[in-house]
Image: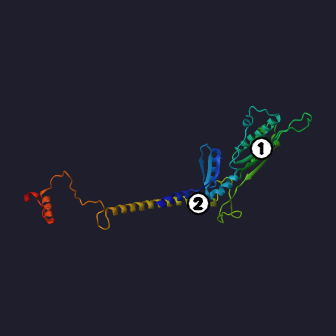
Amino acid sequence: MRRVLILLPVLLLLAGCRTSLFEGLDEDQANRIVAALSHHGINGYKERNADRSWNISVDDADAVVATELASAYALPRGGHANLGDLFSRQGLISSPEEDRIRYVFGLSQELSETLEKMDGVLLARVHIVLPEKDPMDPTHDTLPSASVMMRYRGDTNLEPMRDRIRALVAGGVEGLMPERVALTLVPVTPVLSFPGGCDNDHDIAGGNDVASAAGAVSVTTCSESRARMPSRATTVLGALAALVLLVSGSVWLWRSGLRARFEREPRDGRKPAGASDGRREPMAGDKPRAAGEAKEAGETGEAAGPTEHPGEDA
């Protein structure tokens, strides 16, 4: 029984083995990762820390695929600085050149964050060039320019939005014209390698499963079956652990009942030590026994021999 109780926690632990994927994320990043994994049929588990940050873990069997998905989706996204944080330094004297560099960097960060809010955009980078005016050379080109790179999901078509994206970036920089914004759009389709390969009907590119970056649009049977394997294994192991616990409890109760029965009914027919036959030993102060008991006592005395009475000799 003790061995079973010791092995039971081990079985339960094996039933829920998980691998930590990311730690110390904010809630928005954690939700994005869980949603991306869920679109591909992978269960992501959120755990909250004491400092209000979040950890993401997955089942051991999904660790490799989950890592590839997070990398393809550029998750978790890095934080973006803003102009308020960059110019919040107090008590320090900075040169005009430092202020200019800080301003350009903060402006690029804010525009990148704005573009990443668009549907389907995974990553956005904006580089702004603000040439300095040369008073000695009035003919020098001082018009600003910008370069934008955007990675987006393959199921989202951003090509028709090129002019709108250029106008959005140009509107955030003083003096920038939309035609001076160089825009590069990169569609992303994750290529996921599942351990053990897939069926021939779903094998693409030598055992790799090519899934749409949207996940929900085309999730192959292979990815779904791989994702269900850990949950099935967990269910089976949990059922086995419950069955072992039930059988162990029944055996323990049965053996306890047998032990109590043998203690009440010894095998050799003798009374257990300390057991009585129902008669109570006489004690001082008891009343005289009944006539039948006295007669029985007399017969017992005659069988034992005559009793001497000192008064009769006198």
Does residue 294 sit above or below 123 in this rendering?
below
Q: Which mark is residue 38?
A: none
- The answer to which quarter of the image holds residue 53 is top right
Local SS, label 1: strand
For residue 218, say whether it is visible.
no
What is the CA distance from the residue labelled 1 to the residue labelled 2? Answer: 42 Å
Left-right relation of 220 to 131 = left
First along the sequence among labels 1 and 2: 1
Q: Residue 128 placed where, x, y %?
A: 80, 41
Q: Residue 30 placed where, x, y %?
A: 63, 47
Left-right relation of 21 to 293 = right
Kind of residue at badge 2: Met
Local SS, label 2: helix
Does residue 201 sit above or below 172 in this rendering?
below
Q: Name the residue under label 2.
A: 229
Of all residues, the one furthest to the bottom in this rendering is 268
Q: Looking at this view, is 283 or 179 the one in front?
A: 283
For residue 92, say whether it is visible.
yes
Q: Residue 80 placed where, x, y %?
A: 72, 42
Left-right relation of 97 to 117 = right
Does residue 177 sit above or below 205 in this rendering?
above
Q: Residue at x 77, y 40 (%)?
A: 105
**The C terminus lies in which quarter of the figure?**
bottom left
Kind of residue at badge 1: Val
Q: Residue 294 placed where, x, y %?
A: 13, 58
- The answer to which quarter of the image holds residue 126 is top right
**The N terminus lies in which quarter of the figure?**
bottom left
Of all residues, the one furthest to the front in this rendering is 314
Q: Mark 1 points at which residue?
A: 126
- The answer to which quarter of the image holds residue 268 is bottom left
Disc 1 to disc 2: CB gap under 8 Å: no
